[in-house]
Amino acid sequence: MKDIWPAWSTLTEHGAAELQRVTAPTLVVVGDRDPFQPLNEAVELYHHLPSAQLAVIPGMDHGTTMGNRADLLSVTILNFLLRNVEPVPAG
């Protein structure tokens, strides 16, 4: 824990130019009731990532990410993965 704590506890900011270089499909997920991740900041992040998709989960806040909206969150993530992950060839 002591080795990874600095990465968790230090705010990292990435500028628009740096985010534009992320070309991998990216799912930006935010709850419409999240006080720690405002919707407008998630939208801004989404606009800077060239291959991003945005999912706004209704009724989800920061503390209930896997709580009362786990069903919708799980389906959203699964659908994103199914659309963006190459199938593994049968071997």
Image (cartoon, grey):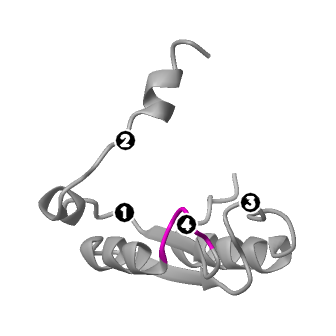
Q: Element under label 4?
A: loop
Horizontal relation, residue 44 to residue 54: left or right: left
**Residue denoted by label 4:** 85
Q: Element under label 1?
A: loop
Horizontal relation, residue 33 to residue 13: left or right: right
Q: Earlier in the sequence, mark 1 or mark 3?
A: 1
- Identity of the amino acid at label 1? Ala
Numbered badge on residue 11: 2
Circles 2 and 3: CB atoms closer than 8 Å: no
Point 62% across, 59% down: residue: 89
- Identity of the amino acid at label 3? Gly
**Residue denoted by label 3:** 63
Question: From the viewer's perspective, is the residue at label 4 or at label 2 nearer?
Answer: 2
Answer above or below: position of 14 versus 66: above
Q: Earlier in the sequence, mark 4 or mark 3?
A: 3
Specify whether residue 9 is painted magenta.
no
How far across and how far down the image is residue 29, in percent?
56, 72
Magenta span dominant secondary structure: loop
Q: CA distance from mark 2 to mark 3?
A: 20 Å
The boundaries of the magenta stretch are 34-38
Q: Quadrant of residue 23?
A: bottom left
Numbered badge on residue 24: 1
